[in-house]
Amino acid sequence: MKTTNWFYKLLPSALNVLLTFGLSLPFLFMFGRGLAWKISWIVIFFLYNCIFEFFYEKRDPGMILFNTYYERKRSLPQELLYVLLYTLSFSTLLFYIWIPGDLLIINLFLVQLPFVLIAKNTLHGFLSGNIKTTRGYKIYR
């Protein structure tokens, strides 16, 4: 079984960010680019992932479009932990310490990429049961 590489982990996430950004646009127009909108987008991202993880094929639209699957079933606590950690990872896109994007760059290049290259999994995937993704076929029922 071949696990996905960094490219097939980044593409689904990028699509999920884009789709949830679209869903957050009404809040952006209502609140502006401040904290209320950022929290709205984070809540949307969390709920979006909960809906797809718990109710729809156990895969989000990014995984569906790029034909990736989890290597095995996960328990409900593993799924919830994954969504929580994935949302926390996503939130680094919206906040910064020194310059815009600094937390995202740290997350992508100093946390996620080394984990993917060494453990063949993202940090949130590793911490929620080390269940990797595969490409092209579903291997469990």
Image: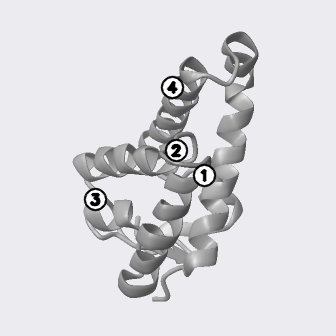
> First in sequence: mark 3 or mark 1?
1
Q: Which is closer to the viewer, label 3 or label 1?
A: 1
Distance (Cα) linking label 4 and label 1: 17 Å
Residue depth check, mark 2 versus mark 3: number of the one nearer the observer:
2
Numbered circles on residues, count: 4
N-term mark: 2 or 1: 2
In the rendered structure, which disc, 2 or 4, sits on the residue that comes first in sequence?
4
Residue of label 1? 101
CA separation, marks 3 and 1?
A: 26 Å
Q: How far apart are labels 3 and 4 at the CA level?
A: 23 Å
Kind of residue at badge 1: Gly
The residue singled out by tag 3 in the image is 128
Looking at the picture, does residue 53 appear above or below residue 35?
below
Label 1: element kind: loop
What residue does disc 2 label?
96
Along the line of sight, the residue nearer the viewer: 47 or 31 = 31
Q: Residue at x 49, y 75 (%)?
A: 113
Dot 2 amino acid type: Tyr
Query: Is label 2 in contact with label 1 (beta carbons under 8 Å)?
Result: yes
Relative horizontal placement of residue 7, taking residue 42 as reference (left or right) = right
Task: Say few, some or many: other residues with alpha carbon within 10 Å of mark 1 (under 14 / 14 to 19 / 20 or more).
Answer: some
Disc 3 residue type?
Ser
User: Mark 4 or mark 3, which is nearer the start of the sequence?
Assistant: 4
- Asked where in the image residue 121 lies, by quadrant, the reply is bottom left
Q: Secondary structure at mark 2?
A: loop
Q: Nearer the viewer, residue 30 or 12?
A: 30
Relative horizontal placement of residue 63, taking residue 78 as reference (left or right): right
Q: Amino acid at mark 4?
A: Ile
Measuring 48% from the left and 45% from the top, which residue is drawn there?
97
Which residue is identified by label 4?
39
